[in-house]
Image (spheres, rainbow, N blue to C red):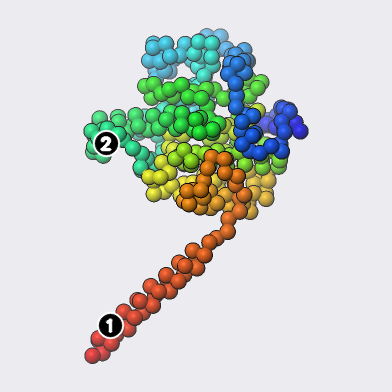
Amino acid sequence: MARIRAEFRGEDKVAYLAARGQSRTTSVSRRLEERRRNSPAKRQTALQYAANCQQPKRPMKTPPRLQPLLDDGLIDEVIHPLMSGKEASVYVVRCGREIRCAKVYKEVHKRSFKKAAQYQEGRKVRNSRRARAMEKGSKFGRQQQEDTWQNAEVDALFKLAKAGVRVPEPYGCFDGVLLMELVTTEDGDVAPRLNDVILTEEQALEDHAVVMQYIVRMLCAGLIHGDLSEFNILVDDYGPVIIDLPQAVDAAANNNARRMLERDVNKMRDYYSQFAPQLLQTQYAKEIWALYEDGELHPDTELTGNFVESDEAADVDTVMDEIRAVLEEQRAREERRKEE
Ligand SMILES: Nc1ncnc2c1ncn2[C@@H]1O[C@H](COP(=O)(O)OP(=O)(O)OP(=O)(O)O)[C@@H](O)[C@H]1O
Ligand SMILES: [Mg+2]
């Protein structure tokens, strides 16, 4: 059946339809395989983007943070700004014949990400001098912290691309600027965010399943996104693409890992459920975490969305009863001692 996606653009919400022949009955893994893009097609899209681009009459003034990359020949032209978010400004740039995306991180004091420490817990800093400086909070330490933060996203992108999660292809992080693939639709437009598209029930179920599979693959690669939302997923003709990973959490070393995974999974459930309300009944967060803890989670685990609470709850009750009994005994003993 053709894949039809209606997209809202801008405030007037003019919908347009894009149709693609794609079977919906294949398993998630096969669909993921089918979605692997090949480079000639991508190059085509980039050229298409350049052709679609309304080039300003005069070239854009170079943002100072991009100048070193221009000087070093890493980019050839800044085409236009794309988006300015809480933590970064994103530009469309040209590198040779390719159109790419440059994410310029804001400096630490301008960022609004308040709970950085919570996310960074467990991140390994290999160089011990650097680790000590970061702990002390000296100027050198702050710079090291900044570098670690900026490199976390490019590291996560390389790791996840290898793990079979659809993310923009990374090209590297230079002077606090992440160069990566610009995710576009087949028409050559910048891909919209999940928040900006409307889905049929069938598409919502399909894309939700794909995102769950990506979350599983991330976890198998040792990472939790940590800020997954309809604003940090782009949707191209092949489905969801995960973006915005500087806060990715080390699953094994972070005490908040379980809570963050649950938050990411449940946010996805709540978002897609507006198109497919039956998703509200699912328990993917508990299912994924239980499999992970038992060492039974694999990149291609077929999830069910069901989770049966184990007898552990009953065991907790038994332990609580025992604690209460001991406390009661102690209280009684003290009463007796007072009376003596
Ligand atoms: N590779 C990409 N291809 C196309 N568009 C992108 C790409 N990366 C980012 N964008 C666009 O830029 C926006 C901001 O990017 P991103 O979420 O990574 O940065 P951010 O500063 O953390 O944003 P926010 O704080 O708003 O979440 C995205 O919502 C998306 O619209
Ligand atoms: Mg974002």
In the rendered image, the quadrant that contains the C terminus is: bottom left
Q: Nearer the viewer, residue 52 or 62?
A: 52
| Cα distance between the residues tagged 1 and 2 | 51 Å
Residue 331 coordinates in the image, percent (x, y): 32, 80
Is 191 placed above or below 51 here? Answer: below
Q: Residue at 60% of width from left, 27% of height from top?
A: 36
Residue 212 coordinates in the image, percent (x, y): 57, 42
Q: Which residue is mark 2?
A: 131
* Residue sitting at the far right: 1
Asked whether residue 112 appears in the rendered view, the answer is yes
Residue 60 circle label: none
Instruction: Name the amino acid, label 1.
Output: Glu
Relative horizontal placement of residue 206, taking residue 220 as reference (left or right): right
Relative horizontal placement of residue 160, taking residue 9 as reference (left or right): left
In the rendered image, the quadrant that contains the N terminus is: top right
Q: Which residue is mark 1?
A: 334
Q: Are marks 1 and 2 in contact (CB under 8 Å)?
A: no
Relative horizontal placement of residue 143, taking residue 14 as reference (left or right): left
Residue 56 coordinates in the image, percent (x, y): 56, 12
